[in-house]
Amino acid sequence: MTASLAILPVLLLALGTPVFLVFLAAVAVTFFFVLPTPSVALHQVLFGGLDNYALLAIPFFVFAGELMGTSGIASRLITWVLALVGRLPGSLAVSTVGASTVIGAISGSSVAAVAALSKTLYPKLVSSGYGKERSAGLLASSGAIDIVIPPSIAMILYGLAAEQSIPRLFMAGVIPGLLMALMMCIFVIAVAVVLKIPVVGRFDPREAWRATKNAVAALLMPVFVLGGIYNGWFSPTEAGGFACLYAIIVARFVYRTMDWGDIIRAAGNSAMLSAQILIIVATAGVVTWVLTTQGVPQTIVAWIQALDMNAMTFLLAVNVVLLIIGCFLDPTSAILVFAPLLVPIAISLGIDPIHFGIIMTVNLAIGMFTPPFGLNIFVAQSVTGLPAHSLYKGVLPFVAVQVAALLIITYVPALSLMLGQSL
């Protein structure tokens, strides 16, 4: 069992096999050749993992993000942020981080943010003096903030896997996400000062007001969604449905950048992406079930107890392990497999499970742009055309910045817990 679940996934991932097939193959080998469990149990566990009302929030938020992402909203947000920070050194880079943060609050899709911003901002960043490698690294790393800023699909999945409150997780992600964005902004301002990059704009109150009016419809979406959840007006699943309706109204009737055909195509794209996510949910649930029935969590707990770890050393070890895992697995897969194993240990050490969920999410967000297999790297590569080794060099300084933010978030739990205490 151990060999089939450890060696086979590594080999299949190295061959580029889709993650859901990797999980399914490893579990199939275990079921049919190792465990004396009837195959009908595999079907029950596979489909039972999808029998959860809260999972409906995933296709809703994916569809809302697809609508907002393809309706020209990125250019409006970039213009709005740039109008506000035009006098700052590195204002173009700061606007990249700011626009990515706002897009994260709208779509929750790191890949969508990187793709949209790279097409619009990469040529401008290069021509402003940031260089190709640094510009691509900034775009790939900024997109990772989207996973932490609510509404976040990763947090929904963690809430289900760890049996924690999704609204509390959403609120817990606000300050850590803003901290990550702030540290990125400070870093790019420092880079701009050192490289003597010229300021590309100036603050004009009339231009700022005009840009705000153009972007206000999009900016209100996360306010309504998070405000509705926080005030108990609707559940996360209902909030996803509201987000879809709001996105259709904004894209079709306010900005008028999409017709009904575009909306139908967005629905098709969202259905494909949602299906991929839910297949991973089902297969990862089977992996977790096999590991649990074989006593793996109990073995890990006993091993940690033998090492006599305290909470601080455990969190440091978790950060190292999750940063490595994030280089190879997407956040969806990693959360569904490792949250059920790690959360009970964290609770036994007195670590708040909501805080631990934010730590997991931030780790895996960093993994999205960490060499060699961070997904955002490949998205940025497809847009910029740079070779992989150039992108690796470009993202490494931003990995260091985000790891510093991770350590602050890890050891200052109040940052994650202060907003959600009233829920």
Image (cartoon, rainbow, N blue to C red):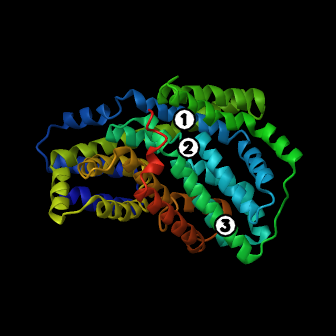
Residue 371: percent from the left, percent from the top?
49, 68
Q: Which residue is mark 1?
A: 61
**Rendering quarter of residue 305:** bottom left
Circle nearer the N terminus (2, 1): 1
What crowding class fits label 1: few (fewer than 14 Cα within 10 Å), some (14-19), or many (20 or more)? many
Q: Amino acid at mark 2?
A: Gly
Q: CA distance from mark 3 to mark 2?
A: 23 Å
On residue 108, the disc is 2
Mark 3 surroundings within 10 Å by alpha-carbon count, few (fewer than 14), some (14 through 19), many (20 or more): many
Residue 416: x %, y % from top left: 45, 48
- Does 183 appear above or below 422? below
- Nearest the viewer among 25 and 161 is 161
* Helix, strand or loop under label 2: loop
Task: Specify the label residue 359 is tagged with.
Answer: none
Observer able to see residue 167: yes
In front here: 120 or 303? 303
In the displayed structure, does residue 377 sit left or right of residue 49?
Answer: right
Tell me whether circle 2 and circle 1 mark residues in contact (CB < 8 Å): yes
Name the secondary structure under disc 1: helix
- Circles 3 and 1: CB distance less than 8 Å? no
Q: Position of residue 253 (x, y in %)?
A: 76, 26
Farthest residue in the left direction? 36
Q: Counting residues from the N terminus, which is met first, the one under dot 3 or under dot 2?
A: 2
- Count of numbered labels shown in the rendering: 3
Measured Cα–Cα span from mark 2 to mark 1: 8 Å
> Residue at label 3?
188
At x 15%, y 37%, the residue is: 38
Residue at 53% in and 31% down: 60
The amino acid marked with disc number 3 is Val
Residue 359 against residue 211 in the figure, above or below? below
Residue 142, by quadrant, is bottom right
